[in-house]
Image (cartoon, grey):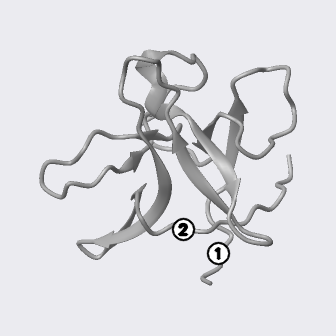
């Protein structure tokens, strides 16, 4: 398994009263890195790319605001192995609309690595950060 410290991130839960991230809890993921263009670093699932047929994870999502407009901003963490976890897109859909769910994986394209929905799960491990 490839290991790297990766990019620091934070989790935001639906309820501000909840302080512990539990498995299968709806959450937003946000990279902690700064950008020069001041865009949101909250993850969201992009629409299907017409050229590749892939659904990419991009960073212009909306934190919180659980609604139909933000349903592609919600993920959850599920156990994948003994010490590994997987990130799952978990759209908070409604009873009459199509809900998109799936594992987040890494795939190569054009010499770059991308996050997106994939049949091949990308296992992750977590390390508590310092504040």
Comparing 123 with 35, the one in front is 123
Q: Where does label 2 land, which residue?
A: 122
Comparing 31 with 109, the one in front is 109
The residue lying at 86 percent from left, 52 percent from top is 130
Q: Secondary structure at mark 1?
A: loop
> Which of the marked residues, 1 or 2, is nearer the chain's N terminus?
1
The residue lying at 41 percent from left, 18 percent from top is 69
Q: Is residue 116 left or right of residue 87?
A: left
Q: Is residue 128 left or right of residue 55?
A: right
**Rendered position, 103 above or below 61:** below
Q: Position of residue 97 (x, y in %)?
A: 36, 21
**Rendered position, 37 above or below 50:** above
The residue lying at 49 percent from left, 44 percent from top is 35
Q: Within the image, what quadrant is residue 107 found in?
A: bottom left
The residue lying at 63 percent from left, 43 percent from top is 76
Circle number at residue 17: none
Residue extending furthest left? 51
Q: Is residue 40 left or right of residue 33?
A: left
The answer for how far apart the CA atoms under marks 1 and 2 are is 13 Å
Q: Within the image, what quadrant is residue 34 found in?
A: top right
Q: Nearer the viewer, mark 1 or mark 2?
A: 2
Q: Secondary structure at mark 2?
A: loop
Q: Position of residue 11 (x, y in %)?
A: 70, 40
Residue extending furthest bottom? 1
Q: Where does label 1 land, which residue?
A: 4
Q: Which image quarter holds the N terminus?
A: bottom right
Q: Position of residue 12 (x, y in %)?
A: 70, 32
């Amino acid at each position: 398994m490839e290991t790297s410290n990766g990019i620091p991130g934070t989790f935001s839960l639906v309820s501000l009263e909840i302080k512990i991230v539990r498995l299968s809890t709806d959450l937003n993921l946000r990279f902690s890195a700064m950008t020069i263009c001041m865009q949101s670093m909250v993850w969201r699932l992009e629409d299907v790319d017409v050229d590749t047929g892939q659904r990419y994870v991009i960073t212009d999502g909306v934190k919180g605001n659980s609604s139909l407009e933000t349903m592609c901003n919600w993920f959850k963490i599920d156990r994948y192995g003994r010490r590994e976890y997987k990130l799952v897109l978990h759209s908070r859909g409604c009873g009459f609309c199509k809900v998109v769910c799936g594992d987040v994986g890494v795939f190569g394209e054009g010499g770059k690595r991308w996050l997106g929905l994939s049949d091949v799960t990308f296992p992750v491990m977590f390390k508590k950060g310092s504040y």
